[in-house]
Image: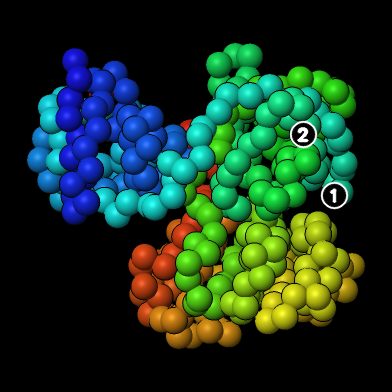
Amino acid sequence: MTFQITVKPSGRQFPCEADETILDAAIRAGVGLPYGCKNGACGTCKGLVLSGDVTHAPHQQKALPPNDVKQGFALFCCAHPHSDIELEAREVLGVGEFPIKKLPTRVAKLEKIADDVIVMSLQLPASERLQYRAGQYIEFMLKDGKRRSYSLANAPHLDQQITLHIRHMSGGVFTDHVFSTMKEREILRFEGPMGTFFLREESDKPMVLLASGTGFAPIKAIVEQAQHAGSKRPMTLYWGGRRPKDLYMHALCEEWTRTIPGFRYVPVISNAQLEDQWNGRIGFVHYAVMEDLPDLSGHQVYACGAPAMVDAARNDFTAQCKLPTDEFYADAFTSEADMAQGVVSDE
């Protein structure tokens, strides 16, 4: 059965089958509903159902708390329609500009740059090119039917090879393979580009770039794209890790401070040890932003990393630092373990 989905206030309409999610149908139709993880963990796609009925596939309760359900909110990445639906959501312009493709790719290079981080370079077929926006991600399609998402770590104009930053997750089937048995020239398949986390180039507001761990990957792409476009916007990068070694491209960030006008870099460590001899900022990375920039009313924030960090930054920046809610752009990295916690289902 096919239902009609209407997006307010734009009035855009698209069909949705009963066995697909509203988000999947929107992506297929080129309608730019906001989204991130696509698996019910990050809450980016949450919106208000004005009329009609939906049920949810399994999702994390923190992404859609019971009180939100009572108020009529839904996670469109997990919501299946049972009638025609009228929903309220802020559409993201430009999402449908580049086609989502399924492509084979060859592992061109595996470079271990930290104990638990590998930079993977991918070579596309000679006849193919992946068009995307800085900040977006791809999904590897694994043989068991599961998928793994990784942000593109280079700007679109640097696409001779696509690079990803892969952190080893203990017990993770895919990352165990990457760090132990994967060889260069191995063939993988992926789908992309995905996500509505990307640089809004039409704005002239100063940017706060907030990253934890390998959340640096899409932030790196955004910095490269802004530089390539000749942007004059001030950029301040706050990169947080538990130990200094977690800031695995620290030298590159320091180089940016010397070569990009208006660029600042603030590394922040949360669990420094004596042997680290760390003399920089200490604590939670988003607290450092609040200390330096108590008024964010004129800024844009791009945040990527652990869900707890992204959620805390969104809440604190909007509640305490006057950041407009629609100027916080985020991509929360969710692992299989993250998704297993606090899962609920309507069905």
Residue 345 percent across, percent down from the top left: 30, 30
User: Quick check: 269 above or below 22?
Assistant: below
Q: Describe the colour scheme in one phrase.
A: rainbow
**Residue 242 visible in image:** yes
**Residue 344 visible in image:** no
* Picture quarter with the N terminus: top left
Q: How far apart in space, not on screen, are marks 1 and 2 (Cα)?
A: 19 Å
Q: Type of residue at label 2?
A: Leu
Q: Is residue 97 left or right of residue 190?
A: left
User: Quick check: 127 above or below 145?
Assistant: below
Q: Residue at x 78, y 31 (%)?
A: 123
Q: Which residue is mark 1?
A: 114
Q: Is residue 271 left or right of residue 278?
A: left
User: Quick check: 281 above or below 179?
Assistant: below
Numbered mark located on residue 223 in the image: none
Q: Type of residue at label 1?
A: Ala
Q: Is residue 230 left or right of residue 34?
A: right
Query: Contact, CB < 8 Å: mark 1 with mark 2?
Result: no
Q: Which residue is mark 2?
A: 122
Q: Residue at x 69, y 67 (%)?
A: 227
Q: Residue at x 47, y 60 (%)?
A: 329
* Picture quarter with the C terminus: top left
SS state under label 1: strand
